[in-house]
Image (cartoon, grey):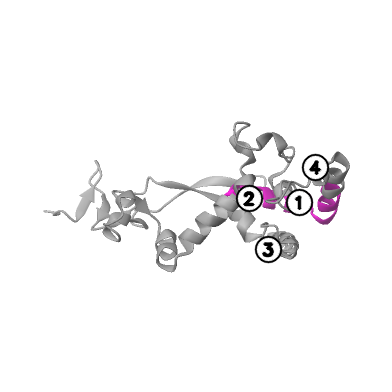
Amino acid sequence: ADGDDIERDDKGRVIRRGRVLISNGERYEPAVAYDERGRLATVMMRIPAGAVIGYLAQDLDPADPDNASRWFTPTERAERASGAKAKREETERRNEHFRWYAGADKPGAAALPREPKHLWQLFVGGQNRSRPRGHDHAADEPQVRDEQERYVESVLTPLEIDILDAALSARGFADIGRLVGCNNDKAAERAGKRALIAAAKKFQEIRQTMP
């Protein structure tokens, strides 16, 4: 008999061993890949059967009622041990302004700038930045936005724009904002822009070397 530490699906495949969640070959996760036209796109990739895809949080911290029967990934486990989870959640609260897609019912939604034509414009174009001590309405003026867009389009190729669109689609807005330093820190924000552009150029180099 399998015992209490093994769980199988309706086809007899092992999907849990102890407190480890195992893929049965039918689980899909979003990933960035090239489509049939050679453009980067977000696709659903199948996780091979037998791959470890999570752990039972209750087994790590039974005193926390929020963890009951909740599966979490190895990355979340590392964050939990390092205290990074609390830091990330705090950053997400500070970056709540990035969630422009949530609807007009959110506080201050009417004061947000227009929605960008491309996702990368939300960060590289300098739109929708945090103003905890007062919103900088000058950044929302049409001529300022157009100037920002022209600058970005002058330093990025169409392929790089596609790459950034795909990459930003695959990551949470708050997480991207944290990574590029958009927390009212202008030096970090500029460094984030340079990093995104450098990443796009690296993708371009890799793309050119592919058969």
Q: Nearer the viewer, residue 29 or 120?
A: 120
Residue 108 higher or lower than 8, as above or below: above
> As shown in the figure, which amino acid type bears the numbered disc 2?
Leu
Q: Name the chief secondary structure element in magenta.
A: helix
**Residue 126 image label:** 1
Q: Please provide percent x and percent y for residue 95.
A: 61, 51
Q: Please provide percent x and percent y for residue 18.
A: 23, 58
Q: Please provide percent x and percent y for residue 116.
A: 73, 41
Neighbour tally class for label 2: few under 14, some 14-19, many 20 plus, Cα within 10 Å:
some
Alpha carbon of mark 4 to alpha carbon of mark 2: how far? 22 Å
Q: Which sits earlier in the primary sequence, circle 3 or circle 4?
A: 4
> As shown in the figure, which amino acid type bears the numbered disc 4?
Asp
Q: Identify the residue at horizontal 44%, vertical 61% (top origin).
A: 75
Q: Nearer the viewer, residue 20 or 101?
A: 101
> As shown in the figure, which amino acid type bears the numbered disc 1?
Gly
Pair 3/4: label in front: 4
Alpha carbon of mark 3 to alpha carbon of mark 4: how far? 36 Å
**Residue 110 image label:** none
Q: Are marks 1 and 4 in contact (CB under 8 Å)?
A: no
Q: Identify the residue at horizontal 22%, vertical 50% (top origin).
A: 7
Neighbour tally class for label 4: few under 14, some 14-19, many 20 plus, Cα within 10 Å:
some
Alpha carbon of mark 2 to alpha carbon of mark 3: how far? 19 Å
Alpha carbon of mark 2 to alpha carbon of mark 1: how far? 15 Å
Classify mark 3: helix, strand or loop. helix
Classify mark 1: helix, strand or loop. loop
Q: Tell me the residue that label 2 is attached to.
A: 168
Q: Tell me the residue that label 3 is attached to.
A: 206
Q: Tell me the residue that label 4 is attached to.
A: 140
Classify mark 2: helix, strand or loop. helix
Q: How many marks?
A: 4
Q: Which sits earlier in the primary sequence, circle 2 or circle 3?
A: 2
Neighbour tally class for label 1: few under 14, some 14-19, many 20 plus, Cα within 10 Å:
many
